[in-house]
Structures are given as C-alpha cells and as structure tokens.
Amino acid sequence: MNVPDAALRVPFKLPSFSDLDEGDGFIYLDGEYLVIEYYILTIGILRGEARFVKAERTVVAGLELRRGLFRDRLVVETSSIPFMREIPGKHADGITLKVWRKYRDVAERFVEQANAWVDGVGPGRLRAGR
C-alpha cells in the first residue's frame, strides 16, 4: 500500500528573476491547500521573511516533474493569473520550480500525492493517465 507522507516538502529554487535576487523555498500540501513557501535572497543574503502562497485545489490543474541532467523542473500547471503573479518570475502556463536531482525521489512522491489531491481521489492513489 502506498502511504503518503503528510509532511512531504520539496525544496526548490526559483528560476532567475532579476540580476541580484534569487529565491529558495519549499512546496507542500497543507490540508486543502497547495503551499509554495519561498524566501528572497539578494546577493545570497536573506531579505525579509518567508512568503506563503496558498492555492486551492480548483486553481491547480496538475503537477509534473520534468527530469534534467543536474536539476529537475517541477511544474505547477495552472491558468490562474493571480496565483502566478504571487510567485516571482515569468510564468507562461504554470509555475516552474527548479529541484536539485538529489531531491528527485521526494519530488516524484510529492507529484504523485499532489495529483491525487488535485483529482480529489485521496492520498496515495495514482492519477489516471499519469
């Protein structure tokens, strides 16, 4: 039986969005929300407090992990402009987060769990067609 990890958190980096700023954070599920928690760093120095962006199930169409050689890309598929505006960077058809390869296993488990959450089929069940 595939038992979900309720505290499954995937660390990520935001794609470059300015010359001096970068972002680090975590993506996770918290009850009825998909949460993107991120920190802005300027020249490697933490600037301000953590920012939390919460999305309801109806805002998220699905998640996908695209494998890369050194980093993978976790894509949160959404068409919600207000949701995409909350995350720094340019987003065309979803929010792209960079995930180091060493976190691939946890990212894959998270994508499976989050897609089940999106479909409302409960934790630990695979989404049809994925």
Image (spheres, rainbow, N blue to C red):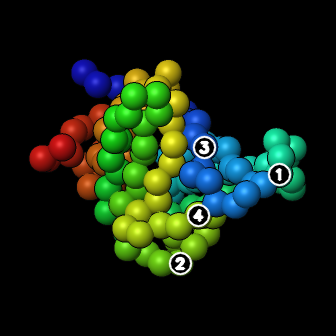
Give the percent coordinates (x, y) of residue 45.
87, 44
Q: Cα distance, mark 2 to mark 4?
A: 13 Å
Q: Cα distance, mark 3 to mark 4?
A: 11 Å
Q: Cβ–Cβ below 8 Å for labels 2 and 1?
A: no
Q: Residues within 10 Å of mark 2 (few under 14, many from 20)?
A: few
Give the residue displayed 60% in from the left and 43% down from the top. Answer: 13
Q: Cα distance, mark 1 to mark 4?
A: 15 Å
The three-letter amino acid code for the residue at tag 3 is Lys
Label 2 sits on residue: 82
Q: Earlier in the sequence, mark 2 or mark 4?
A: 2
From this viewpoint, is residue 66 visible? yes
Please tell me the numbered disc located at residue 92: none
Q: Cα distance, mark 2 to mark 1?
A: 25 Å
Please tell me the numbered disc located at residue 13: 3
Q: Cβ–Cβ below 8 Å for labels 3 and 1?
A: no
The three-letter amino acid code for the residue at tag 2 is Pro
Q: Earlier in the sequence, mark 1 or mark 4?
A: 1
* Circle 3: element type: strand
Query: In the picture, residue 94 is in which quadrant?
Result: bottom left
* Circle 4: element type: loop
Label 4 sits on residue: 89
Q: Earlier in the sequence, mark 2 or mark 1?
A: 1
Q: Nearer the viewer, mark 2 or mark 1?
A: 1
